[in-house]
Amino acid sequence: MKSYIKISGPPLLKAIKALEKVAIGMPEVCIWNIFIANIPTFYTYGDINYTDIDNYFSGVGEVPKKRCGTIISKSGESLGEYDFFFEWFKKPTLAELNSLIEKIDEALTPLGARYTLTTK
């Protein structure tokens, strides 16, 4: 199951970095976004290189080594019209979805970025 995010208005890059920071603290999800989709290294669906993960997330937050192999979605580039998704490892509860919305609100409100969220 995925929670897709469509970001409305600037600053798109800052908003995506803020969402990535949210994901680092959520071990129950992995992510994919429009920037990851354009990095050829992440198209290899086998083992992900820890250095690539560290380089990508530098400035956003430190990704624990045990999380490096799970933070990037292996389901591929299925963004469609969206800018970002959180992929759940199991079907999320209503409380988990509400928690995600709260975390997204906290991350994006200071930036002035608006978003829509669709979980399916």
Image (cartoon, helix red, strand yellow):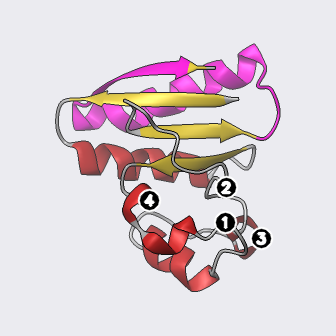
| Residue 88 left/right relative to 52 | right
Expressed as whole percent of the image width and height from the top left, the position of residue 13 reads: 26, 51
Compare residues 12 and 45 and report the one nearer the observer. Answer: 45
Say which mark, if any, is on residue 66: 3
First in sequence, mark 1 or 3: give its number. 1
Which residue carries the number 2 mark? 74
Disc 3 crowd, CA 10 A, few/some/many (<14, 14-19, 20+): few
Q: Name the residue carrying label 4.
A: 36
- Quadrant (top left, top right, bottom left, bottom right) of the N terminus: top right
Q: What's the residue at 48%, 51% (across, down)?
A: 20
Which residues lie in the magenta part? 89-118
Q: Helix or strand or loop: what does disc 3 sit on? A: helix
22 in magenta: no
Tag in front: 4 or 1: 1
Which numbered mark, 3 or 2, is in the foreground of this view?
Answer: 2
Asked if residue 108 is among those painted magenta in the image, a careful observer would answer yes
